C-alpha cells in the first residue's frame, strides 16, 4: 500500500503521459456561439487536462492538445450540441503511461 504522504500527485502522474498532436485536425471543436451554456462554461473548470478556456469576449474555446479522452465535455454538452467530439485518428492523441 502506498503511503499518502509519499504518493505522487495527480499532476505528476499526468506528466508521465505523452500526447501526439494531429496538426490541423483537432478531434474536439466548439461550435460558434454567442453565450455558452452552463454546461459548456463549466468545462473551463471541469476538464482534467485544462483544455477549455474563456475568451475575453465571453465565449468558450478548446485547445484539444493534451486531452485525456475522458469524455466529460462530450457528456456535459450532449443536450446542447455545442461541441463536436471525435476520437483522435489512429496513432494520435494521448499515450497513457502507468495505466
Ligand atoms: S474529453 Fe476530457 S480531457 Fe478531453 S477535452 Fe473533454 S473534458 Fe478535457
Image (cartoon, helix red, strand yellow):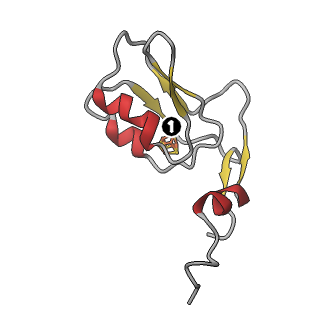
In the figure, 60 relative to 18: above or below? Answer: above
- 79 to the left or right of 5: left
Left-right relation of 22 to 3: right
Q: Compared with residue 87, is residue 77 higher up or lower down, i.e. above or below?
A: above
> At 37% across and 28% down in the image, what residue appears?
41
Say whether residue 48 is left or right of residue 63. Answer: left
Residue 40 screen position, x and y as percent: 37, 29
What percent of the width, then of the height, locates residue 21? 72, 37
Outermost residue to the front = 5
Q: How many marks?
A: 1
Residue farthest to the bottom? 1
The residue tagged 1 is 86
- Residue at 61% x, 65% y: name it: 9
Relative to 12, residue 98 above or below: below
Quarter occupied by the C terminus? bottom right
Quarter occupied by residue 89: top right
Looking at the image, which residue is at 60% across and 30% down? 63
Neighbour tally class for label 1: few under 14, some 14-19, many 20 plus, Cα within 10 Å:
few
| Residue at (64% x, 43% y) in the render | 66
Percent x, y of residue 45: 44, 39
Residue 17 image position (x, y, % from top left): 70, 57
Report the quarter where the N terminus lies. Answer: bottom right
On whether ligand 1 comes within 8 Å of the CB at mark 1, the answer is no
26 over 2 or under it: above or below: above
Task: Give the side of residue 72 with respect to residue 93, left or right.
Answer: left
Give whichever of 87, 17 is nearer the camera.
Answer: 17
Q: Please, what secondary structure does the residue beneath circle 1 have?
A: loop
Amino acid at each position: 500500500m502506498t503511503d499518502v504522504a509519499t504518493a505522487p500527485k495527480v499532476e505528476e502522474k499526468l506528466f508521465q503521459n505523452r500526447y501526439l498532436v494531429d496538426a490541423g485536425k483537432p478531434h474536439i471543436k466548439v461550435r460558434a456561439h454567442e453565450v455558452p451554456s452552463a454546461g459548456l462554461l463549466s468545462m473551463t473548470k471541469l476538464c482534467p487536462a485544462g483544455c477549455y478556456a474563456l475568451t475575453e469576449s465571453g465565449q468558450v474555446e478548446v485547445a484539444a492538445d493534451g486531452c485525456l479522452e475522458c469524455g466529460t465535455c462530450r457528456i456535459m454538452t450532449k443536450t446542447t450540441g455545442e461541441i463536436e467530439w471525435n476520437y483522435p485518428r489512429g496513432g494520435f492523441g494521448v499515450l497513457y503511461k502507468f495505466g
